[in-house]
């Protein structure tokens, strides 16, 4: 596979977004079911302002979408590729044995 510079930049930006434990926890929660900022705050124990900031980044990268219903916005993972990427990363980490530090 050969990536163009533009595509490599976009993938790198997405990977940087996924490098945040808070954003990963939000994606994992949204993978269970769509929910609001308030529900994410309650379920994850993350402050509302922090949840909103993480969601802004995830929306910018098209990893999540928000749908307004009255005064509430319900967020969900944008598509199955995002869920699969998350699952594969978690699966990988669960099967990798920690390596001893290089001496």
Image (tube, helix red, strand yellow):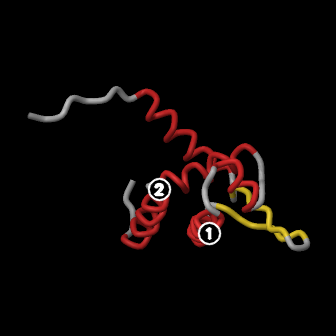
Q: Which image quarter: residue 37?
A: bottom right
- Look at the picture and state if 68 lies above or below 42: below
Q: Position of residue 55 (x, y in %)?
A: 62, 65
Q: Is residue 34 left or right of residue 1?
A: right
Residue furthest toward the left? 103
Q: Is residue 99 left or right of residue 74?
A: left
Q: How many marks?
A: 2
Element type at marker 1? helix
Return the residue nearer the eye: 40 or 18.
Answer: 40
Disc 2 target residue: 20
Q: Is residue 60 left or right of residue 20?
A: right
Disc 1 target residue: 49
Q: Residue at x 91, y 73 (%)?
A: 70
How crowded pointer 1 is (Cα within 10 Å; few <14, some 14-19, many 20+) is rated as: few
Q: Residue at x 44, y 34 (%)?
A: 93
Q: Which image quarter: residue 103?
A: top left
Dots 2 and 1: beta carbons under 8 Å? no
- Look at the picture and state if 20 lies above or below 33: below
Is label 2 or label 1 in front? 1
Q: Residue at x 18, y 34 (%)?
A: 101
Return the residue nearer the eye: 83 or 20.
Answer: 20
Q: Residue at x 44, y 67 (%)?
A: 7
Mark 2 to mark 1: distance in Å? 16 Å
How crowded pointer 2 is (Cα within 10 Å; few <14, some 14-19, many 20+) is rated as: few
Q: Position of residue 61 (x, y in %)?
A: 57, 68
Return the residue nearer the eye: 43 or 101.
Answer: 43
Q: Is residue 89 left or right of residue 99?
A: right
């Amino acid at each position: 596979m050969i990536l163009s510079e533009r595509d490599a930049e976009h993938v790198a930006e997405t990977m940087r977004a996924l490098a945040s434990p808070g954003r990963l926890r939000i994606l994992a929660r949204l993978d269970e079911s769509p929910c609001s900022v308030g529900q994410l705050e309650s379920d994850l124990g993350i402050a509302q302002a922090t949840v909103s900031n993480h969601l802004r980044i995830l929306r910018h990268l098209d990893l999540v979408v928000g749908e307004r219903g009255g005064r509430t916005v319900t967020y969900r993972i944008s598509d199955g590729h995002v869920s699969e990427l998350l699952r594969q990363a978690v699966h990988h980490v669960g099967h990798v044995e920690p390596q001893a530090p290089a001496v």
